[in-house]
Amino acid sequence: MATTTHILGYPRIGEKRELKFALERYWRGDIEQSQLQQLGSDIRAQNWSLEQDAGLDFATVGDFAWYDHVLTTSLLLGHVPARHRDGNNNLDTLFKIARGQSQHNACCQGHAASDMTKWFNTNYHYIVPEFSAQDEFSVTWAQLFDEVQEAQKLGHSVKPVLLGPLSYLYLGKEVEQGFDRLTLLPKLLKAYQEILNKLVTLGVTWVQIDEPILALDLDSRWLTSFQPAYQALQCDLKLLLTTYFDSVTDVLDSIVELPVAGLHIDVQAASQQLEQVAQAIPEHWVLSVGAINGRNVWRANVSEWLERLQPLKRQFGQRLWVASSCSLLHSPVNLEHEAKFSQEVRSWFAFAKQKVAEVVLLGRALDGDEHAISQCKTYSQPIEKRKSADYVNKPAVQQRLNSISANLAQRSAAYPKRAHHQQEAIGLPLLPTTTIGSFPQTGEIRSLRSDFRTGKLAQDDYITAIKGHIEDAVKRQEALGLDVLVHGEPERNDMVEYFAELLSGFQTTQFGWVQSYGSRCVKPAIVVADIEREQPMTVGWSTYAQSLTDKPMKGMLTGPVTILCWTFPREDISRKTIAQQLALALRDEVNDLQQAGIDIIQIDEPAFREGLPLKQREHQAYLDWAVEAFRISASVAKAETQIHTHMCYSEFNEIIESVAAMDADVITIETSRSNMELLKAFEEFNYPNGIGPGVYDIHSPNIPTSEWIEALLRKAAEKIPVERLWVNPDCGLKTRNWSEVDASLANMITAAKVLRKEWQSE
Ligand code: GLN
Ligand code: ZN
């Protein structure tokens, strides 16, 4: 009655981001496609043998992607946007869809990339499929089948993974008015039938078919489409219907009617669904329990899981499978490379490779293997011990948390009064101009930081050099005539990691990379203990910058919600509690900044919206504590200290009330690409405080003309009273170069001056 063990997918980037580097070399034209292909096949071979050597029952195939797996699915289905079709879909076609014009292949000049968006509530992104009425699907891209054969040749027992037809459709968008992409389902299913039949001929028995949309609030049209769709997919294969990221109990009645052979559920994201699902599923189905967290870095408490799953094992026998909760693509690859962790710290974590071993261990223990059972105990001890470790639980932090009251989250005066005080203290012109914080991160700046990090550069020399860059940024801003200056963030590698390294309670990793999109990876820090600010983190840089100018210098902090969203959180306390700890630490920083004479402080919250839970009914609770956390950090500001926040995205409709409740004196947002359309949400809500709608897209090297910016500002002024309007780019300028920045900002300032003159005299 052996328990089957498997994972939903393994990281594809390689242990040291080999895929990233190879992709970028290929895009630059430095290596041949065959070399890139070879590297891909090496990574796959490595991953599969790791999975099978560790003792998993399957090697998961189809989790490899050259960019992201939704885009791979588009190619598999021969579903390529018309502008990128070139007769023979090949790897370059795929890259063109993802990146637009590729340097490697000049043919698609001017053909825009498809949109990219977040994969559910993770920090991984996918290329959005584009649907229109005349779309056809044909299975011409052989990657999946080739990889199945590749793995079989290596002697592996293969379980292919496929993104399910309904999730594929749902995650795309219509590019044609008045058309409903769900009407494409019958055509799409024909292609899926063909795929499944090919897998049958390859000797496959189980297919993992991912339908993560079942964990969303699905409307009935989508939900009722599952039954006929899965009827149409009947063949000589066993389908494991795979869900993750949240509970599926809302739709369980529909799920259990589907003609599939098993169900995978994520009991990390939604632990309470386990028993209910186990009760409800048909007698012949397999239940795959996603117990090992694919989205975080913590070592699993396998003993606890063993105890919880034992009754299910008795009930299900070999129909119980054990798995990762979701694909391990969301977790860093291999803990063995982290040379800087102490023994103790290391014993708290498991990255992808270690998670594979956890799945196997749990499976063996469930099968009654005595050795495995005792190993579960030893393995879980460090996690147990950690719960009460002094290092983790800091009485001072907890005391402060307990004393949080409504008062702490309340500015000393309401916005109109504050605005008045601030105007008296700071004295800004109509349509004040500013930037979002960062200036070009030149190669020189990056090597400074890396030389300092590796000890090549002494601290004093490093500080002097960074100060030089701050001075340069201040001079340029003065020359341009900006009203509110920034220091330019040359000392920051990343807006979250910078703070994580300075706050106590975090661990940063050396190689803990996780794919964000395509070749881009991020290296989130880990919250390991109660968070405390041990010393000021930004005051030195900001006051130095302020000392160089009479113009107001804006202090620059990353907000509590964004730090939380872009790190691996602890799992022994709630996200809300972590956000509160961060809020208190940042509050002290805000206070120190204002004491040091910094009158304007920006607290960035670009991740505010992405922290939303998947289920609508949980939104309000999140928004409430997220707003509170921001307010706790900001409310120490005196009435005359001006608090800014920044969010670089669109779609404020759903959260506008909460954004207003944050009560920042000024919010800067990304609006230029939507032609100020996004301001509608602010207009309709009658957003009461200051707003800086971004007037140019910082993602593009194009220099906006002053006329263009002027036109955008006129549009903005139709929606927002000019007295509350600020003028700034969409986001930070760190990815641009100085010549682009100087030219763009000069035009921005010209536009502001023209309108200032015009509107002042009215
Ligand atoms: N202050 C940050 C910067 O300018 C904000 C970045 C962001 O919004 N993601 O780089
Ligand atoms: Zn931004």
Image: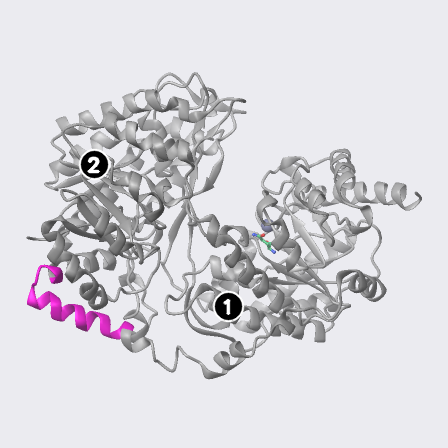
In the rendered structure, the answer to whether residue 633 lies left or right of residue 11 reads right
Give the secondary structure at mark 2: loop
Disc number placed over residue 260 in the picture, else none: 2
Residue 253 location, quadrant: top left
In the rendered structure, the answer to whether residue 281 lies left or right of residue 601 reads left
* Earlier residue among tags 2 and 1: 2
Label 1 neighbourhood size at 10 Å, few (<14), some (14-19), many (20+)? some
Q: Is residue 46 visible?
A: no
Residue drawn at x 7%, y 63% is 369
The amino acid at mark 1 is Leu
Residue drawn at x 23%, y 42% is 44
Where residue 694 sits in the image (x, y, percent)? Answer: 68, 44
Residue drawn at x 41%, y 31% is 221
Residue position for label 1: 457
Front-most of residues 7 and 217: 217
The amino acid at mark 2 is Val
Inspect the magenta stretch and tell me whether residue 381 lies in it: yes
**Highlighted range, magenta:** 365-383
Where residue 709 sits in the image (x, y, percent)? Answer: 74, 38
Label 2 neighbourhood size at 10 Å, few (<14), some (14-19), many (20+)? many
Q: Quadrant of the C terminus?
A: top right
